[in-house]
Each structure stands twice: as C-alpha cells, then as structure tokens.
Amino acid sequence: MTLELHNTLTGSKDPFEPLQDGHVGMYTCGPTVWNYAHVGNLRAFLFYDLLRRQLQADGYRVTHVMNLTDIDDRILDQAMHAGTTIVEYVKPYVEAFFEDMRSLRALPADHYPKATEHIPDMVAMIGTLLERGFAYEADGDVYFRIESFPRYGMLSHLDRSGLRPGMRVATDKYDKESVSDFALWKKAHPDDEKLGAAWDAPFGRGRPGWHIECSAMAKRYLGDTFDIHGGGVDLMFPHHENEIAQSEAANGKPLARVWLHSEHLAEAGGEKMSKSAGGFTTLRDLVAAGHDPLAVRFFLIANAHYRSRLRLTSEALHASAEQVRRLRDFAARVRRMDPGTQEDQELIGRIAKVRAAYKEALDDDLNLPQGVGQVFELVREANAAMDDSRVGEHGRRALAELIEEVDRHLDVMGGEEPGLAEEVERLIAEREAARSAKDFIRADLIREELKQRGIALEDSRDGVRWRRVTRERGM
Ligand code: AMP
Ligand code: ZN
C-alpha cells in the first residue's frame, strides 16, 4: 500500500502523490511565541514531526517549513506590559520553543521563518491583492474582500449563506460567527512605534495581520503551490481559509494540494487546552512534576490517532512512561542477547508480518497507535522466545531491524535512558539507608532490582559505584 492521507479539502483519505517526484514541500503553522508552548501546541508540532518521519520512511525528501509568529495582538499587548520591544519580548519564548522541540526529539524543520523578518514579502502580496481588487483600504487598514473570492469556505466546507459581505474584523483571532472581511494590514498605532512593530508600506505605515504572514512565507520558501499544509484543527477556520483566499487570489494558483488537521489535546477535565483560557500545561510543568519528555512524546503521538481527541491525565502519562520503558528494555535486551543455536521459524514469520502491518498502519493516514499495538504483541512473543532461548542470529537480526524501523517514528528506544543516572543514584541512596538501618532484606531487594535493569553495584572504599552489565540470559 502507498501512503494515504486524510485531506480536509476533499474530505476523504486519498493516495498521496507529490507534485515533484520524490520530493515533498510542506508548510505547517508554528507557535505564536507570546508565551511557552503548551502541551496541546506540542501535540500539533509532534504531529508534524510524525508526518515528516513517515514521508521520509516512504523514501521522500522533505522540505519542511514551520513559521514562528512573532507579531500578533497578544505579543503587542504583552510587550507593552513588559515595557519592551516585540523582538526582545519573544526571545526567551523562541528559545524555549526550540528547547522543547529538542527534548521531545522532534526533527528540526528546514526553515523557521519569523514573521517580522518577512514584512517585504507580505507588503508585496498585499500590493498585488489591492491591484487585483481582492483587497481594499479603510482608514489606513487594508482588508481582504471575501466577496471577491467565491471559493471562500471550501476548506472548512462553510455554509456561505452566513456570509456578511462588508463586515470587517481587525483582530487576529476570531470565532466561527465572524465570516467577515479580515485585516491584511493594520494602521500603525503610536504605541506600535515604541514596540518596534511598525513598517512602511505603499498603503501606509503599519503592521501585518496574522493570516498574511503564512501566505507570504509559504510562497517565499515553497513557491505558489506545494504539497502539504498542516495545522491544528482550530486553524482550519478562519486562519487556513484566509491563507487560501490570500494566496490563491494573489498567485492565481492553488496553495496546497493536501490539507491536514490534527485534533486537540484536552485537559484532564475534557476542555480544550488553550493559552488564552488560562489553564494550560507546558512541557516544563510536566518535567518538573517528574515526567520524562520521552513519555510525553510517546503519549502525544502514540496514544491516539492524530485525528482523535486526546486527554492529558497523569495516569495516561504514567502508562506511556511504562510503555516506553518496556520498549527500551526490549531493545536493550535484543542488543545484548547472545543468539542461540535454535531458531524459531514461527517467530521469524511473525516478525515479518508485524513489520508489514506496522508499515501498513502508518501508510493508512499515520495510524501509529495501531502500528504500535502490533509491536507490543510481538514484544511479548519475542520476550518469551528469548526466555526459552529460541532466538538465533537470524531472529535477532530481524528483531533489531524491526526495532530500528519502529523507532524511526517513535524515537524513544535509542540513546541513554533519560533520567537513568538520577534513578540509579536514588536507589543506591535508598539501599545505603536500608543498610544503615540494618534492613538487609530491603538492601538486597534494591540490588536485585537494579540487576534486573542491567545495573551492577560495586561497593568500594569511595562508596558505591554502578555500571551497566550485559543481562544474563533468560532474564
Ligand atoms: P498557536 O501558538 O496558538 O499559534 O498554535 C500553534 C499550534 O498549536 C497550531 O497548529 C494550533 O492549532 C495548535 N493547538 C493549539 N491549541 C491546541 C490544543 N489544545 N491541542 C492541540 N493543538 C493545539
Ligand atoms: Zn499559518
């Protein structure tokens, strides 16, 4: 099977075909850096990462562009309160975003264009829209005239009867009731000058609206038409609808061929996680509460299909941590095992089957949860086979290849176990305390637990040292 993706434009799962043989151009809406990204935002960003990884696994070269919105209403407000410029205000949040992406092992995009560094591209596009009659000026602002674009609403399958021509909204974010002309350019307010948020343009000094930035930067890095545009489902209307209107009106060509939207992450109570609503959780919060970023990664990509809602609960995070641990233990065991002389042919057949099923699940609109489910079944079977020494060189190699393939998406099995050193040190301290209290049974239990995890303890004059050891067979 070849890759099929659920395209919001067509409303169906369609076989994916890129414009250019072997290459995929993809634009995804990145963070508005007015604050730390919350775990809901990170779900969207890890969905982009999963998509990129699957395209690469299917043999495509990918050019991935993810913008940073470093100017919008909220950033202006916050910079104003902080008494600084917008560029200074967003700096720590931009850094924090990249840090989060690294801890979650998201592959870096090829370009991270910032809106404030692409103002001339936006001014040029707005100029074209004015020239062609798709936009008009009103009191120093410039608006897109949605009446001039009959396809407006095609992405979100909007009922155009609710359309109120001539109604205008100037805010960057607005709700479903506001099917209205939207701002492309906003006249400079005296405060904007102090904030470093005003630029010259033929239609007057001002700043861009939110939507035009993506149209202008997508064109700059990917051309008029590209393969995939992605974002969270809340961006479908109005943001993506507006992007389509601006780009297609200005360029006279379709914008993206495939539109993908990932579902929300909800709070434990069920409500959508949102920064504006106040209650939100960041990766930093979770790490401070003792969660491992890789468990968070696994939870966000492997617990639910990207088009299903997902709820953030601490039980779900703990379950994900446990699954990551099982996978890592399994991978380590396969790496260290000495192949036996027996070879279980049935197991080898199963490995090939699971490999095919895993690929098929991912090609089916990125169904990672389904693929991972199959892998866990196999992990159980293969562990039992290793217990009985039924895995020879052939079997070991097949398992290693499967692990490598699965980790192309999951990326949780390679590298040093995060937090391992701290965990071992904690157990060693606990064992020392038990020994001082003459609780030798407890002390031995801890030593045994560490041994099970491939860690050996050595009592030395300088205290207790630990090292990794090859696991004994049959463990
Ligand atoms: P923003 O920083 O608000 O521009 O959003 C960045 C990305 O996060 C967009 O793709 C949003 O659709 C997505 N997003 C925002 N809130 C959530 C949420 N609760 N769950 C999943 N994705 C979200
Ligand atoms: Zn966008």
Image (tube, rainbow, N blue to C red):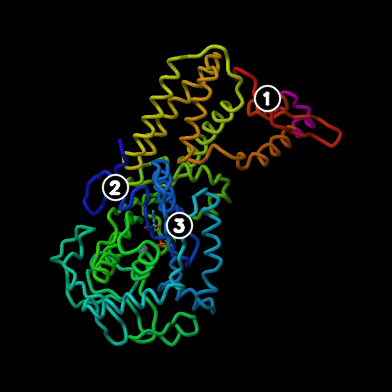
- On the image, the x and y values in percent for residue 27 come to 37, 58
Whether the magenta-drawn stretch holds residue 149 is answered as no
Quadrant assignment for the C terminus: top right
Q: Is mark 1 within 8 Å of ligand 1?
A: no
**Left or right of 449 on screen, residue 463:** right
Task: Give the residue displayed 42% in from the left and 46% down from the top.
Answer: 50
Q: Is residue 466 left or right of residue 151?
A: right
Q: Which residues are magenta?
A: 432-442
Mark 3 CB lies closer than 8 A to ligand 1: yes
Depicted 252 relative to depicted 131: above or below: above
Q: Residues within 10 Å of mark 3 (few under 14, many from 20)?
A: some
The first of marks 2 and 1 along the sequence is 2
Circle 2 sits on which residue?
17
Q: Amino acid at mark 2?
A: Glu
Name which residue type carries label 3: Phe
Q: Residue furthest left?
A: 161
Residue that lies at the very extreme toward the front in this rendered image: 21
Query: In 3D space, how far apart are the residues under numbered discs 2 and 1 (Cα atoms)?
Result: 54 Å
> What residue is shown with label 3?
280
Secondary structure state at the residue bearing disc 2: loop
* Residue 66 % position (x, y): 43, 60
